[in-house]
Image (cartoon, rainbow, N blue to C red):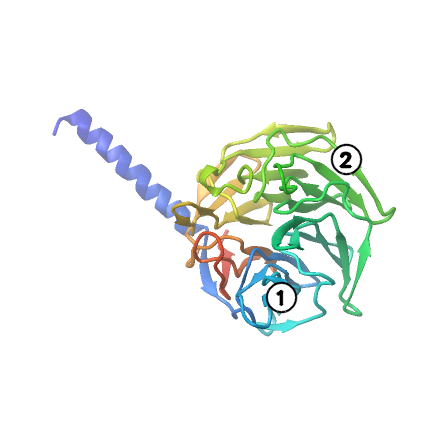
Amino acid sequence: MSKLKFLITLLVLSNTILAHAESASHGVWHNAASTLEKRTEIAAAPLDGKIYAVGGFSQPSLSNVLDFAVSRMVEVYDPATDTWTETTPLPEGRHHAGIAALDGYLYVIGGFTKGGLSVWRAVATLYQFNPVNQTWRELKPMPTARGALGVTVYQGRLYAIGGYDGDNNSAAVEVFDPQTNIWTSVAAMPTARDHLAVVTASDKIYAIGGRPSLNYRKNMDVVEVYDSATNQWHSRAKLPTARSGIAAGVIDGRIYVVGGESNEGTFNTHEMYLPDEDRWVVLPSMPTARHGLGAAVVNGRLHVISGGLTPGASFSQVHEVFTPTR
């Protein structure tokens, strides 16, 4: 072997070792209590130190055949006891809904429900859940009905971003102010897509991954960031692994993106974005590959909940937790 080839080989090996070392140094996975029911395409969010897993598809059975397995179920996880309980179900079954918590309430936005012989009727509904008396109420609907959207909270308002309206992808960004019960529109995403992840980090809103027209054979690696001060979107470093049907959470300003699906299978991929550096880091994979999963951060840990084990209609009760080490 020539000296040049030896040096190149040594450099490649060194970079590989360093990459694995960096990955391993960022945290570990462990199992937590399984959910009460096998579901996929759920919505999950933290509220008051607990995690709510809402709607989705349940595993088909005689008990849910009339609802086409579109779930109304709401499960609540208590990290202090590592247990799940049920609370008041949704007023109507939803899958692929958006979800977020704000000022002590849980908000479930949009999604799909049954309509005739289809389970893909896009809706614009906005439900608010009060955890004190465990009741739901319906607020003013979104201007644009859609499911497979992303929802996040920024400066006391709810942002509903992207999705699929039943005919086309949406680039819509609609903003709800709970204080006024009014929706407004801001600059649309440059890239229309559904099955994306949306989070708030470093005083910006990030729209990550996704796909066009519910087609997971055309997954996207697009990352776009919204600056409310200028009402503009900008591109950022691409997602290392193009995927959709993903979930994401933010811990200490870092964005963690997990799971997804393609025509070849589901992903156990776990990648972290550093907003201040515009850089991605590959982290230890999820133990269980899946899509249509929910993610929620409580006490500095990323909880990844339920989801499909294979592309399309599949279900699980899996609950895995990632604890960052730095």
Q: Secondary structure at mark 1?
A: helix
Q: Is residue 121 left or right of residue 302?
A: right
- Check the picture and name the quadrant holding the N terminus: top left
Which residue ends up furthest to the front in the rendered image? 117
Q: Is residue 27 left or right of residue 227?
A: left
Instruction: Report, in whole angstroms, how far the alpha carbon at label 2 lies from the one at label 1.
Output: 37 Å
Q: Secondary structure at mark 2?
A: strand
Q: Earlier in the sequence, mark 2 or mark 1?
A: 1
Q: Which mark is residue 106?
A: none
Up the image or down, 323 lies above or below 124; here it is: below
Residue 147: percent from the left, percent from the top?
A: 64, 47
Q: Amino acid at mark 1?
A: Leu
Residue 200: percent from the left, percent from the top?
A: 65, 43
Quarter-of-image position of residue 281: top left
Crowding at label 1, few (<14), some or many (≥20) Cα neighbours within 10 Å?
Answer: few
Q: Which residue is mark 2?
A: 185
Q: Residue at 72%, 43% (x, y): give it.
A: 159
Residue 75: percent from the left, percent from the top?
A: 63, 67
Q: Which residue is mark 1?
A: 66
Q: Nearer the viewer, residue 15 or 112?
A: 112
Up the image or down, 278 lies above or below 47; here it is: above
